[in-house]
Image: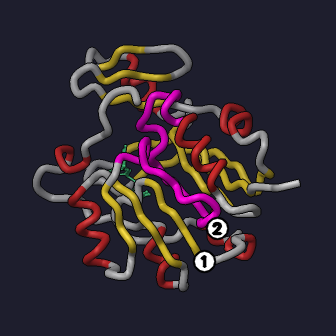
Amino acid sequence: MIGSPVDYDKKFKENLPIQPAKLDWNLKRYLNLIPGKEVLDLGIGQGRNSIPLAKLGYNITGVDFSYKNLERCKELCPKLNLVRADIRIFEIEKDKYDLISSRCVLHFFHKDDMHQILHNIKENLKANGLVYIQVFSVEDPKLQKHINSNNFEVLENNILHNIVNDTFVSFYTKNEILDLFSDFKTISISEEYFLDQGDDIPYYSGIIKYVGQKITN
Ligand SMILES: C[S@@+](CC[C@H](N)C(=O)[O-])C[C@H]1O[C@@H](n2cnc3c(N)ncnc32)[C@H](O)[C@@H]1O
């Protein structure tokens, strides 16, 4: 493991902003391809994506490092199975999960760590299971902002090291994500550039969304 996990409990010392739950359209339209009901959400946050899935009858296991986010998840949906862990060392039970999702989390790592997490996901996902991820794209304005900031050390391949808190943030291209999933069947890949109005001060984001399926011979 390289560096520290992003600490959301420190980031939002007092008030955790409330994030409305809404199942992503990119995933919603492929629910019919998920072979069963077991879902693992790595970096569940406040359950924005998983609480709507729980309401549809899926059994959710959510992993997160933030006590505050896990508490909020439990309040909002007591039936979630929640685990506090760093997803870089969380052991995924083999052949248990029909869907493994990690939305807006995997960019918060050095790419070597992200590759290791993807390896664990791909190895342990059930046959025909789906994976759903969202990561920052190289079009995200934060990339240039961080490059120009004294707080970041610029490493190779769009990886940045925050020297203040020893965390990493990485930015991806669509081809890079497709290469990482070259052994999966691509169900959908898209890139978006949009004004994110979720926080107090709206900001632009660049995101890659990928849905893939584990195909066995
Ligand atoms: C931007 S939020 C996304 C939450 C949720 N997936 C969503 O889409 O709303 C990132 C989440 O990842 C969690 N996280 C970041 N690094 C982590 C790590 N190493 N292990 C576990 N959780 C982590 C944070 O605590 C936070 O809840």
Instruction: Read off the magenta span.
Output: 86-114
Q: Which residue is mark 1?
A: 37
The residue shown at (51%, 77%) is: 59
Residue picked out by circle 2: 98
Q: Is residue 133 magenta?
A: no
Side of 173 where 148 appears, left or right = left
Q: CA distance from mark 1 to mark 2?
A: 6 Å
Three-letter code, disc 1: Lys
User: Colour scheme in the image?
Assistant: secondary structure
Q: Which corner quadrant of the image does residue 76 belong to?
A: bottom left
Identify the image quadrant of the N terminus.
top left
How many numbered discs?
A: 2
Relative vertical location of residue 93 with respect to residue 170 in this rendering, above or below: below
Badge 1 or badge 2: first in the primary sequence: 1
Relative to 42, residue 165 above or below: above
Tell me if the residue at label 2 has its CB under 8 Å from ligand 1: no
Is the magenta region chiefly helix, strand or loop? loop
What kind of residue is marked 2?
Answer: Asp
Coordinates of residue 143 in the picture (x, y in percent): 45, 27
Instruction: Name the disc covering residue 55, or none.
Output: none
Residue 90 place in picture, x, y as percent: 43, 49
Which of the pair 3/155 is nearer the observer? 3
